[in-house]
Image (tube, rainbow, N blue to C red):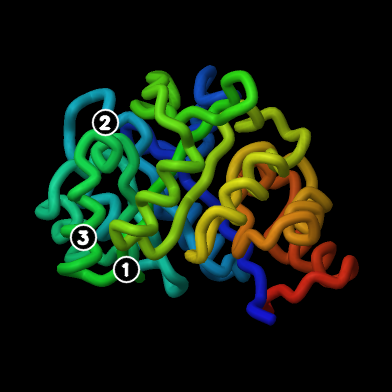
Amino acid sequence: MIAKRIIPCLDVKEGKVVKGTNFVGLRELGDPVAMASNYSKAGADEIIFLDISATNEGRQTMVDIVKQTAEQVFVPFTVGGGVKTIEDVNRLLKAGADKVGMNSAAVQNPQLITESSDRFGAQCTVVAVDAKRVGDKWHVMTHGGSKDTGIDAIEWVKEAEKRGAGEILLTSVDTDGVKDGFDIALTEAVVNSVRIPVIASGGVGKPEHFPEVFKKTDVSAGLAASIFHENTFTVQQVKDVCRQQGVNIREA
């Protein structure tokens, strides 16, 4: 059985790590380079860096911060935000990212997924999906969760896989920052629709939420921000709880 991964996520705006609720009400929490370095040393299995305002501000990801972070991080490092072209993907990989996440631009131009996978490999190509429940379905949201595309999220992840995505980073807009736990229904629906790894994101408030999603779905990894950034719990504490509940977890 493949060990589950615990992943801290750094949402970065104007050079600072921020966090909000349901993608709004952002507050500053610290320096991304220092925080990423600390998580790498503390046993995080991967680190994800999302420049969350790049798309709305119509600019590229902050490559200088990515370079500085990559020099301090010794676990797989995924970067996303503002990725619009294959040149953007190349620039981030050269800056030190191991994988590149694409969201809004991939929805607008799905060929970007194919180009990235063909040129750099599926293992470098992560499609980030922000999904919000609308009736009995989930819609794909873009532009930092602010724009409803009307696209069925389940159909979209299937297409992303066909086009060469190597991983899905799935965030529930409904549970993001609420701290009541992952969106189990959404996560299960997506995991059951694709064969590639899925990272669950949105809603963690305590360590027990990780084993819950790992036991109820076949998701490959769980991601959190608030509980780690605010020093409520450590990566090690989360891993200890997972092991206590019988989850196969990577050693810290």
Q: Name the residue under label 2.
A: 55
- Residue 122: mark in rendering: 1
The location of residue 179, given as percent across then percent down, is: 73, 34
Residues at marks 3 and 1, CA–CA distance in whole angstroms: 8 Å
Q: Is mark 1 on a helix, strand or loop?
A: helix
Residue 1 position (above or below residue 155): below
Would you identify the image quadrant in which residue 161 lies? Answer: bottom left
* Mark 3, other Cα within 10 Å: few <14 / some 14–19 / many ≥20: many
**Closest to the observer, 234 or 250:** 250
Residue 97 position (above or below residue 224): below
Residues at marks 3 and 2, CA–CA distance in whole angstroms: 18 Å
**Closest to the observer, 217 or 47:** 217
The location of residue 126, given as percent across then percent down, is: 37, 56
- Residue 116: mark in rendering: 3
Would you identify the image quadrant in which residue 41 lies? Answer: bottom right
Kindly identify the amino acid type of the residue bearing the numbered disc 2.
Thr
